[in-house]
Image (cartoon, rainbow, N blue to C red):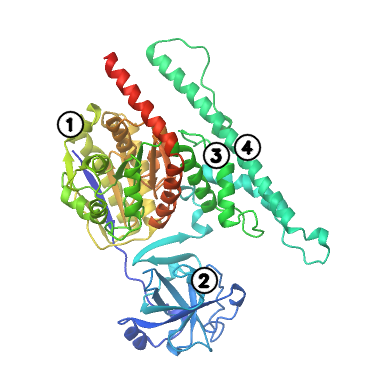
């Protein structure tokens, strides 16, 4: 049933050095690239960034260093302007840094880093850490470290965008931006720097910090009220819609909530969100209210929303679904047997939750391919000796919504026929309808190739491996394809082919799928008997170019950015599940009673 279009773009290799940076001993550096060097790292404070000895001479401008830059210093004469990949052998974390300074007091081959670079692979409290490093190619000038920080974790590259790129509309979340804007008011007006004075009345730091906490809490309590009013209005609108469908006349018309007017793109809320309580928890960990120069950030608010959603849904959670890549495991990798997530997912099954991996990876009916991707997790089930009942609560839904597999008591996946779980309206999708939409997508992607002169290929069914492209170009392909398909479906000749689709940025490629994760979550809810308020989806692709975005309409969501964050939210969730075990047991008992009464009525 599933037909998909994969679009993979090749990226030329990064150059080691640009001409304007001067002449470097490339032969020596090329030898360094072929081996790992064992040495040590430490870090310098942010106020020591002004002297970059590799710069500011021979006509080369001073390096405008920032504390967040991935940069470092070495005593080796041949390392100026070069980039090295540093790996911490204890935790396997890696970071790529550019050498921009001479460290006269450093032993040969040792590296002095910015604190942020050091903290990305080691605990700053350790001070000095043993590492291995090797020379690697630096980013090209278009991706200067001043504008894009490249971080490698276990050999996989992700990117952390500075404000230059994050200001793009497709890289912003309107609701998070709304909350961030509200919290800017007390920060701008009251979060003043510590005065340099001996007057004790002006240095009452504890009072000012408590006042900041109170101000942030007041704003978040007000946003809670906006959400609650929105929930009441959406319930009334749903009642009117159902009444109209049934032919029952009800007085009144649907009314927009205040939140809908303030954030027009706001979607459905399936639970209330205790934002004030979640902020207090986040503030205890990250000292948000104590900050005087850095306001509450996008990530601060994203984490607060995650904690609020976990708190709200924990007592009644039935179904939890996960994206695969960059949520449970690194992009393109398999689920490792030693991942900390193995025991956490086992715990979820022991708490009687239904767990499902909902992934874009499409291997039609091929259980062995999915078992390979999830080998470490399935081995963990076997090691934990999960019962037949627990095993059968684990599912894999591949190709967004097209191939469903269930774990059996032998710890292997079994393919479930489409007729067993797919509703009739999906089974009725025809090949002609599917191909018509994919033809439009292919035409647009080919145009992107021609206009941006990309060295890539458009493929249907089979992806092309080992190619990469800039994220901005991938986003351009996604957004233009979304726009083109929507225009086609709204045209007179496209209305007959009106099927749900998903065009998204896969990190190194662009995918256009028939169906999407919203359909996938709906299928699981109907098949497994869970409501939107009892369903939680965890993923990393919640921007408009991602494929987790659509699930917001159908269930509660947690927005994470990597498997480490998934571990963090699951630790929060399992702690709440344990604390609310008696409450959940009562709800389960009531559900069983309702099922029994329904069966007797029948």
**Residue farthest to the front, as pictured:** 582
In this picture, residue 297 sits left or right of residue 140: right
Distance (Cα) linking label 1 and label 2: 55 Å
Report x, y in % for residue 285: 56, 55
Q: Whole-Å distance between the Cαs marked 3 and 4?
A: 11 Å
Residue 232 in view in this figure: yes
Which mark lies nearer to you, 4 or 2? 2
The residue tagged 1 is 419
Residue 113: % across, % down: 50, 76
Kindly report the distance in space between the C-alpha atoms of the residues bearing marks 3 and 2. 33 Å
Q: Residue 266's x, y, as percent? A: 50, 36
Q: In the rendering, which numbered label is found on residue 274?
A: 3
Disc 1 crowd, CA 10 A, few/some/many (<14, 14-19, 20+): few
Say which element carries label 1.
Answer: helix
Using the image as rendered, state which of residue 110 and residue 32 is in the foreground.
110
Query: How packed is label 3: few (under 14 Cα within 10 Å), some, or many (20 or more)?
Result: many
User: Mark 2 — residue?
Assistant: 124
Quadrant location of residue 373?
bottom left
* Residue identified by numbered label 4: 222
Q: Residues within 10 Å of mark 2 (few under 14, many from 20)?
A: some
Who comes first in sequence, dot 1 or dot 4?
4
Q: Distance of mark 3 from mark 1, alpha carbons?
A: 41 Å
Estimate how packed mark 4 is, as few (under 14), some (14 to 19) or many (20 or more) residues with alpha carbons within 10 Å.
few
Whether residue 430 appears in this view of the structure is no
The percent coordinates of residue 103 (x first, y second) are 52, 85
Q: Quadrant of residue 193?
A: bottom right
Disc 4, SS: helix
| Marks 3 and 4 close (CB-CB < 8 Å) | no
Where 317 sits versus 140, above or below? above
Lower sequence index among marks 3 and 4: 4
């Amino acid at each position: 049933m599933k037909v998909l279009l994969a679009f993979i773009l090749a990226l030329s290799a990064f150059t080691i050095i640009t001409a304007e940076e001067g002449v470097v001993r490339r032969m020596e550096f090329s030898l360094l690239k072929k081996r790992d060097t064992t040495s040590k790292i430490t870090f310098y404070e942010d106020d020591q960034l002004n002297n970059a000895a590799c710069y500011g001479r021979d006509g080369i401008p001073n390096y405008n260093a920032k504390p967040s830059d991935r940069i470092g210093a070495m005593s080796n004469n041949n390392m100026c302007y070069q980039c090295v990949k540093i790996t911490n052998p204890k935790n396997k974390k890696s970071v790529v840094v550019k050498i921009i300074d001479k460290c006269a007091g450093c032993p040969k081959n040792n590296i002095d880093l910015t604190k942020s670079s050091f903290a990305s692979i080691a605990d700053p409290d350790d001070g000095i850490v043993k590492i291995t490093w090797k020379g690697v190619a630096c980013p090209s000038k278009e991706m200067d470290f001043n504008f894009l920080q490249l971080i490698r974790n276990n050999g996989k590259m992700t990117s952390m965008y500075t404000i230059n790129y994050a200001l793009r509309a497709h890289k912003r979340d309107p609701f998070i931006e709304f909350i961030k804007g509200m919290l800017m008011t007390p920060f701008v007006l009251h979060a003043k720097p510590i005065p340099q004075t001996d007057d004790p009345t002006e240095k009452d730091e504890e009072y000012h910090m408590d006042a900041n906490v109170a101000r942030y809490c007041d704003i978040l309590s007000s946003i809670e009220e906006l959400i609650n009013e929105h929930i009441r209005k959406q319930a009334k609108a749903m009642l009117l819609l159902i009444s109209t469908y049934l032919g029952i006349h009800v007085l009144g018309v649907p009314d927009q909530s205040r939140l809908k007017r303030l954030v027009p793109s706001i979607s459905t809320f399936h639970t209330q969100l205790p934002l004030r309580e979640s902020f207090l928890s986040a503030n205890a960990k990250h000292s948000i209210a104590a900050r005087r120069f850095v306001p509450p950030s996008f990530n601060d608010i994203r984490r607060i929303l995650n904690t609020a959603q976990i708190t709200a849904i924990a007592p009644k959670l039935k179904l939890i679904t996960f994206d695969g890549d960059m949520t449970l495991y690194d992009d393109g990798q398999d689920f490792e047997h030693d991942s900390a997530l193995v025991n956490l997912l086992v715990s979820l099954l022991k708490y009687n939750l239904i767990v499902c991996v909902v992934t874009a990876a499409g291997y039609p009916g091929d259980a062995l391919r999915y078992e390979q991707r999830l080998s470490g997790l399935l081995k963990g089930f076997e090691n934990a000796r999960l019962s037949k009942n627990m095993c059968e609560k684990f599912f894999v839904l591949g190709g967004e919504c097209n191939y469903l597999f269930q774990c059996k008591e032998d710890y292997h996946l079994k393919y479930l026929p489409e007729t067993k779980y797919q509703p009739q309206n999906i089974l009725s999708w025809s090949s002609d309808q599917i191909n018509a939409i994919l033809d439009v997508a292919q035409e647009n992607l080919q145009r992107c190739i021609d206009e941006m002169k990309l060295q890539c290929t458009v493929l249907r069914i089979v992806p092309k491996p080992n190619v990469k492209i800039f994220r901005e170009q991938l986003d351009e392909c996604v957004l233009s394809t979304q726009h083109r398909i929507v225009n086609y479906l709204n045209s007179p000749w496209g209305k007959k082919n009106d099927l749900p689709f998903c065009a998204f940025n896969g990190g190194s490629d662009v995918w256009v799928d028939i169906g999407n994760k919203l359909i996938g979550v709906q299928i699981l809810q109907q098949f497994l008997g869970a409501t939107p308020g009892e369903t939680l989806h965890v993923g990393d692709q919640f921007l408009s170019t991602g494929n987790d975005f659509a699930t917001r309409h159908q269930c509660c969501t947690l927005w994470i950015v990597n498997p480490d964050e998934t571990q963090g939210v699951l630790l929060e969730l399992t702690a709440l599940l344990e604390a609310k075990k008696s409450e959940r047991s009562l709800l389960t008992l009531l559900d069983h009673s309702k099922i029994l009464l329904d069966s007797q009525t029948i």
